[in-house]
Image: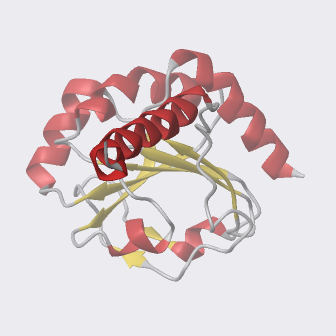
Amino acid sequence: MSWRLWLPFLVFFAFLGLAAYQLTQPRDDVVKSAMIGEALPYFDLPPAVSEQPGVASADFSDGRPRLLNIWASWCLPCIAEAPQLEQLKEQGAEIVGIAIRDKPEDVARFLSQHGNPYARIGRDDLSEVQLGIGSSGVPETFVVDGSGRITYQHVGDIRPEQVPILLGELRKAER
């Protein structure tokens, strides 16, 4: 019998062995952002709704840390995190929002249905700011210290058990 007959089987079993090995390795759920420790890039966004001011990078340089929440009215996980954002606001967190690729009327409808925890909301029609700060999707929340430097990034919707973590990161950013 020729070795060529066994070659496909050997390749197949080598593939199975590699796949089994990869499945036994621990998952790394931590996103390592290149922007942690970096200053926010310059931006000046118009208001997403007429009732609130827009957002500029200069707003983050007054000595007070804030949460910067990247979200959209069309985002289902953004609806899921709305109660947690309200809870963060009630516990003293100042939250600034950036609405991604959204229409003012859709933003207003979202806020009236799910609450408005934001001190300011900017409109990022082309996702330029979103991509500039290292966000790849919505929702994402950043802790920004009082000098405008990103100190923490939370990817995905905020779950109830993550509220204390974000509050702790916000407190750390005060120092």
Give the x, y percent position of residue 143: 64, 50
Above-or-below relation of 148 to 137: below
Of residues 148 and 5, the one nearer the viewer is 5
- Residue drawn at x 69%, y 62% is 36
Give the x, y percent position of residue 70: 40, 52
Give the x, y percent position of residue 42: 52, 83
Which residue in the rendered view is the most extreme toward the front? Answer: 1
**Residue 166 horizontal side relative to residue 114, left or right:** right
Quadrant in the rendering for residue 163: top right
Of residues 54 and 80, the one nearer the viewer is 80
Above-or-below relation of 13 to 123: above
Quadrant in which the N terminus appears: top left
- Residue drawn at x 21%, y 69% is 125
- Residue drawn at x 77%, y 33% is 168
Give the x, y percent position of residue 22: 54, 36
Which residue in the rendered view is the most extreme toward the top? Answer: 161
